[in-house]
Image (spheres, helix red, strand yellow):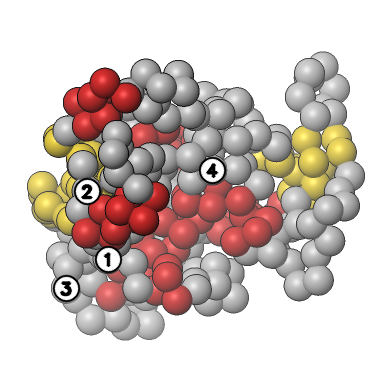
């Protein structure tokens, strides 16, 4: 069966502020320390804290990776308003919002109920991404400022087949004091029952096997402010946002066979 993607945007998005330790293997001193985002800036839940990270990154870089991935998943894993649900402001009324249409624009934005004002959001996204990457991600833009508040273009990217039962795998491509290149391999399971497969069997299948992988690049750069990601994606969002990711495995057509066209 064909998957259904409800993407209303073709644009990507994201983030700004402090980074991590200048050199992966050098001890931190008062003169060399960079300022990293704190738990208050980007609260990480148990799932985010247990996310697989590259073992060739130091501890601070691994935290930076988890922060970047949590933010990226929230914004690109399904709904553009995902940050409202993943990082809500205390007591935020998620069913009530104000709207804003910029002069000369056909787009109407809604107020965010996330924990961040525009200034804090801008600081956080620049804390994990380079200016170049953030400009590319928010090119449309999806996230804008209005009267000091964060507003969001409310759209859906649709669902993907990412299977978080299987930890991401990482391969180091190159590493210097200024740049770290590596790839991420994520795992995916087709979610619908095959012909003759029950829903219970489908559930067990996705717990014990995957049908394909996607491998995509990530680049971490040492900037004047600290380490920042200049190329980034996550397995949750790779199907939608990494068109050049390398596919390996069984195609959906081959997996479902004669039943593939059902519901198309």
**Which comes sooner in the sequence, label 1 or label 4?**
1
Name the residue that disc number 4 marks: 78
**Which comes sooner in the sequence, label 3 or label 4?**
3
Residue 25, label in figure: 3
Residue 210, label in figure: 2
* Residue at image location 84% in from the left, 61% down from the top: 93
Position of the C terminus, as image quadrant, is top left
Q: CA distance from mark 3 to mark 4?
A: 37 Å
* Residue at image location 39% in from the left, 74% down from the top: 49
Q: Nearer the viewer, mark 3 or mark 4?
A: 4
Position of the N terminus, as image quadrant, is top left
Q: CA distance from mark 4 to mark 2?
A: 21 Å
Question: How far from the left and from the top, in percent, is residue 53?
Answer: 26, 65
Q: CA distance from mark 1 to mark 2?
A: 17 Å
SS type, badge 3: loop
Q: CA distance from mark 1 to mark 3?
A: 20 Å
Query: Residue 230 vs residue 186: left or right?
Result: right
**Which comes sooner in the sequence, label 2 or label 3?**
3
Name the residue that disc number 1 marks: 52
SS type, badge 1: loop
**Which comes sooner in the sequence, label 4 or label 2?**
4
């Amino acid at each position: 069966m064909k998957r259904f993607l409800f993407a209303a945007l073709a644009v990507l998005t994201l983030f700004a502020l402090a980074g991590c330790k200048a050199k992966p293997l050098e001890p931190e001193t008062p003169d060399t320390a960079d300022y990293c985002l704190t738990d208050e800036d980007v609260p990480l839940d148990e799932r985010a804290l247990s996310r697989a990270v590259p073992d060739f990154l130091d501890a601070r870089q691994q935290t930076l990776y988890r922060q970047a991935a949590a933010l990226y998943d929230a914004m690109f894993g399904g709904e553009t308003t995902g940050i409202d649900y993943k990082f809500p402001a205390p007591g935020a009324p998620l069913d009530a919002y104000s709207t804003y249409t910029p002069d000369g624009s056909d787009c109407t934005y809604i107020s965010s109920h996330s924990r961040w004002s525009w200034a804090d959001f801008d600081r956080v996204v620049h804390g994990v991404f380079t200016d170049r990457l953030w400009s590319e991600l928010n090119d449309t833009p999806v996230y804008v400022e209005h009267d000091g508040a964060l507003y969001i273009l409310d759209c859906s990217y649709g669902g993907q087949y990412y299977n978080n039962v299987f930890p991401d795998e990482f391969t180091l491509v190159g590493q210097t004091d200024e740049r770290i290149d590596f790839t991420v391999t994520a795992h995916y399971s087709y979610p619908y029952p095959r012909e003759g497969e029950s829903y219970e069997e489908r559930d067990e299948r996705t717990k014990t096997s995957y049908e394909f992988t996607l491998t995509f690049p990530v680049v971490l750069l040492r900037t004047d402010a600290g380490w920042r990601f200049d190329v980034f994606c996550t397995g949750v969002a790779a199907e939608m946002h990494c068109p050049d990711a390398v596919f390996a495995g069984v195609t959906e057509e081959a997996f479902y066979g004669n039943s593939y066209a059902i519901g198309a």
